[in-house]
Amino acid sequence: MGWERWGEACARAEDIAAVDRLPTTEPAWEDVGVQRLVAIALTALGTQGEQDPVDTGHLVWHLNRGAGHLRQLAAGLVGQDLAVARDIDPASVDMTTEGMAAWVWLTRTWPEDGPWDGMPRGLAPGLPDPAVEVLTPHATHAALAALTRERGGYERGTLVTATDGRYEGQVATVMSSTWALDAERQTLNDGPPTGYEVLFRDPDAGHQREMLRTEQLRPATPDEQALERAQSMGIQTHFATVWEACERWAITLVWWHQQQKPERWLVDTDPHGRGPVATSLLAAALHAVVRARRLDQPTDGSRVHLTPLAPVATLLDSGWSTVVEALGQLPETASPTLEMLRAIQRADGAVGDEHAAVLDLSYDVAWAHARSATVPSGTSVSDLATGLVEPRLVDRLDALAAAAQRQHEMDLDRSEDL
């Protein structure tokens, strides 16, 4: 009864369902259901002979009309009575025909507490309705995702930047695409999507969903993507000043090093040890490189995360006099870090062994991060030292976020001991 295209339809349905499905070790009930629904629709539409192969936009148009319409399509394959039935008796049909067996599965009801044909179920597990009723909207979504890829649109999860309107210049995450229905041709508009539903991270109002036209969006640049990734991990990226940004990044760099190499910090009975001075020097070196690389605009420090780490280490390895010279004009604000640096400036390079040891420790922090950063495969130490490959602060996001979380836990433990 028209099942000749079933094998071909199943293969294509598997490809369509995979576009928007998370990789799993075993198929879930909803994954199998979506795949079978798409295969039924493709087989039915192919049997009608209108298109060969069936256009994905045409497939979406029919799936979008809902479960009732899908049952009408299936009538051309299974007959009118079975098309509208629930809980078909397997003994009453030819279960050796894979397409018919799939339709029996799609139209059966399910125990609210399972089992679900030996598969896990994450979608509406307490709902007993047949898969054709529950999953047709999800099959439509899967086909839309496949159409978006086919037409070169922005796929779900893609980072884009708004080019005008309220969110101009801000990065958003694509959630879904929007299209214009063409009822006369029973398909969607030609070309790419007409727009997208996107999710903005609003510091004041939380996450904001917006519908924007395609021409209002562009792909986010790698730097914009890095900034969004940092924010998604809870890492502060905007500050009152560039100097404050350098201080905060330096503190987190030191936290990681203290946690990874605690023996380098246990030098005396001072609970803080060399931390404050080393952090001050690291912040100053960051600030010098930020200025040299013109990453100090805008003045909120939102580009400091792009600072390369190797030049910071090189500066700290060049000796006190060079470091003092690189400090330049320190910001006219009050902070313990700046007071330490002003004292270093006043010393004018006249330092003892302890200061040299702290400078060496600061270098070790910067170089350890440069060597531990995520870099292209095959990168050598020489590549890092010569600047052929330049790991940046942003390449240490995962490690720094983990270090900040660990430091928070350690601080809580200390407060509980008091």
Image (cartoon, grey):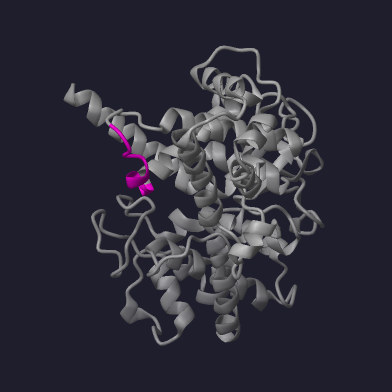
What percent of the width, then of the height, locates residue 274?
A: 40, 33
Q: Quadrant of residue 198?
A: top right
Question: Residue 210, can we see it?
Answer: no
Along the horizontal axis of the image, is 41 left or right of 295?
A: left
Q: Nearer the viewer, residue 236 or 31?
A: 236
For the N terminus, the quadrant is: bottom right
Residue closest to the far left: 417
Q: 395 and 16: which one is in front?
A: 395
* Above or below, comparing residue 230 to residue 129 in the picture: above
Query: x, y (%) of residue 6?
Result: 56, 81
Residue 411 in which image quadrant = top left
Q: Which residues are magenta?
A: 260-268
Number of labelled discs? 0
Q: Residue at x 48, y 60 (%)?
A: 22
Q: Quadrant of the C terminus?
A: top left
Examine the structure image and report whether residue 80 is included in the region drawn in magenta. Answer: no
Q: Is residue 406 above or below residue 87?
A: above
Question: Can I make out residue 385 in this image?
Answer: yes
Q: Residue at x 44, y 74 (%)?
A: 102
398 vs 155, left or right, is left
Q: In the image, residue 310 lies at what x, y percent?
A: 62, 49
Q: Nearer the viewer, residue 361 or 369?
A: 361
Determine whether, in the image, residue 102 is placed left or right of residue 61.
left
Residue 221 x, y percent position in the rendering: 73, 46
Residue in the image at 72% along x and 40% along y: 161
